[in-house]
Image (cartoon, rainbow, N blue to C red):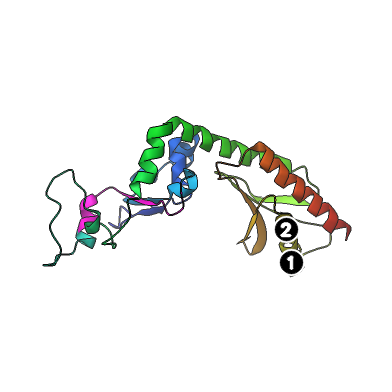
Amino acid sequence: AAREDLWLHVDGAYGACFLLIEEGRRILSGIERADSFAIDPHKGLFLPYGTGALVVRDGAALHRAHAVLADYMPVRQEEADLVDFCEISPELSKPFRGLRLWLPLQLHGVQAFRAALEEKLALARWATEELRTIPDIEILAEPQLSVVAFRGRPEGVEGPALDDWNRRLLERVNAKGRVYLSGTMLRGAFVLRICVLSFRTHKERVAMGLEDLRSAVGVMTDL
């Protein structure tokens, strides 16, 4: 991107919050070279839904892209340290989203958020090691942050039938209503995912999910 003079943007909506901790900075090494990155504090900082931000190296570029001049729009950017958000985004009217991020940091301090993020990484690693102990489960994507992808692989089930088996496995686990796992396609195969990213998720909840998964695998293998 630098060689071709291109704008380098990083979609850090889920992961960029992990820059707060040492391991996250190691994993995301190189993000400092980006021209911009998106970050969703409603994910990695456990804040109310809709709390998102765009971090930009060159703020003047945003102004050039979005500022609108019209007779009916008053000039408000008169002080150097005053940011008129109408001139740096497509929205002319917007709520005070920044308060949702500023206030929790003022109340709790950044260390509380660092500790929570470190806990989520540790839980994802622990869940992965526990998954290895469940018969007929294989890990398809080791956790880099707090997501691990896996699937059931019962003997004699392959191809589309294996995808269907895993979709039924996902439904059976989630039907209990104690945890919620998600699914996705990975290298052409349907897989399940554990994503540990809630301030209410601690080791007992992850253990509960693994218990439900182990039970569901056992039932389906016996069918």
Percent position (x, y) of residue 117? 52, 38
Q: How many marks?
A: 2
Q: Residue at x 76, y 45 (%)?
A: 211
Q: Residue furthest bottom?
A: 160
Residue depth check, mark 1 versus mark 2: number of the one nearer the observer? 2
The label shown at residue 175 is 2
State which tag comes first along the sequence, 1 or 2. 1
How crowded pointer 1 is (Cα within 10 Å; few <14, some 14-19, many 20+) is rated as: some
Label 2 SS: helix
Give how far apart the Cα atoms at labels 1 and 2 are: 16 Å
Percent position (x, y) of residue 212? 76, 49
Percent position (x, y) of residue 135? 81, 48
Look at the picture and state if 159 lies above or below 51: below
How crowded pointer 2 is (Cα within 10 Å; few <14, some 14-19, many 20+) is rated as: few
- Amino acid type, callout 1: Asp
Tell me if 124 is positioned left or right of 25 in this view.
right
In the image, which residues are magenta? 48-63
Look at the picture and state if 28 lies above or below 93: above
| 53 inside magenta stretch | yes
- Amino acid type, callout 2: Ala
Q: Which residue is mark 1?
A: 164
Tell me if 74 is positioned left or right of 169 in this view.
left
Quarter occupied by the C terminus:
bottom right
Quarter occupied by the N terminus:
bottom left
Label 1 SS: helix
Of residues 164 and 72, the one nearer the viewer is 72
| 37 inside magenta stretch | no
Of residues 21 and 92, the one nearer the viewer is 92
* Quarter of the rendering containing residue 33: top left
